[in-house]
Image: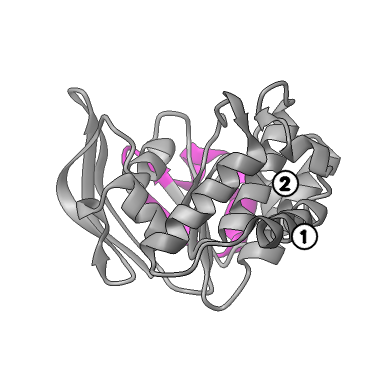
Amino acid sequence: MLKIENLHAQVGETSILKGLSLTINAGEIHAIMGPNGAGKSTLAYTLGGRPGYEVTEGSATFDGQDLLALEPHERAAAGLFLGFQYPVEIPGVSNLQFLRESLNSQRRARGEEPLSGAEFIRLAKEKAGLLKMDMDMLKRPVNVGFSGGEKKRNEMVQMGIIDPKLALLDETDSGLDIDALRIVGEGINSIMRKPDKAVLLITHYQRLLDLVKPDFVHVLAGGRIVRSGGAELALELEEQGYEAVA
């Protein structure tokens, strides 16, 4: 589904990714861990097409397409979802309005009929219920006045409604209490743990991986993946730290 080969990327004059290679197949969940500044968020932003992240060498293909040649909205329409470490607030735009326009614009790009208002509300209620989010919160402006945990839960509702093929989740567990972490973990499993979907999960902590149970864990350091393994690798990182394991 996603194949990254020898990817180099920089922000301004600073080189951050330095020859990263990774393959993610449909049906797999991959976790990336590593020290601060290793390039984890840069990888997610580069794949998502965030402005200012320049690819200088290497390639990334998604479902056979040259991912790096697509504009950000084209990557989203192709089935890519980027979950932010710090979800942004959008004053004046309701969650429901934002999500309906986002979903229907992607459906039109794929040649599908847009959902009617009633169809969309039914879908939104279903996904909000899955993440135990009150529908009243979806009527509020996007993330405005939300706690950190509510923002992450809201982002999982967005993911459920958009229903992507590949989710890039950048430290989704950041700032979550135990209950919110459990809900988010269950949401990732119910939405994305399917044979035709995949997840790239960036995290610092074992606690989310206990819930999501990734198929593969990778250590990213110095702009490249230096070690890969199964879920047991995350336990080594928890016990020994990055220096000992990498």
Q: Nearer the viewer, residue 214 or 100?
A: 100
Camera-side residue: 235 or 30?
30
x, y percent for residue 245: 49, 47
Residue 241 lies within the magenta run:
yes
In the rendered image, the quadrant that contains the N terminus is: bottom left
Residue 209 lies, in percent from the top left, at 67, 53
| Residue 197 magenta | no
**Mark linked to residue 185:** none
Q: Quadrant of residue 87?
A: top right
Q: Residue at x 81, y 44 (%)?
A: 135
Q: Secondary structure at mark 1?
A: helix
Reading the image, the residue beneath label 2 is 207
Foreground tag (2 vs 1): 1
Q: Amino acid at mark 2?
A: Arg
Question: Could you tell whether 90 is left or right of 223 in the image?
Answer: right
Q: SS at mark 2?
A: helix
Which residue sits at x=32%, y=43%?
49
Q: State the residue position of label 1.
A: 126
On the rendered structure, is 137 left or right of 152?
right
Residue 18, placed above or below residue 150: below
Disc 2: CA contacts within 10 A as few (<14), some (14-19) or many (>=20): some
Direction from residue 212 to residue 195 in the image, left or right: left
Q: Position of residue 137 (x, y in %)?
A: 77, 36
Between the C-alphas of marks 2 and 1, the distance is 27 Å
Q: Which segment is the magenta one? A: 220-246
Whichever of labels 2 and 1 marks the residue nearer the N terminus, that label is 1
Q: Quadrant of residue 40?
A: top left
Query: Could you tell whether 151 is left or right of 106 in the image?
Result: right
Q: Nearer the viewer, residue 93 or 184?
A: 93
The spot of residue 226 in percent (x, y) is 37, 50
Q: Does residue 44 sit above or below 88 in this rendering?
A: below
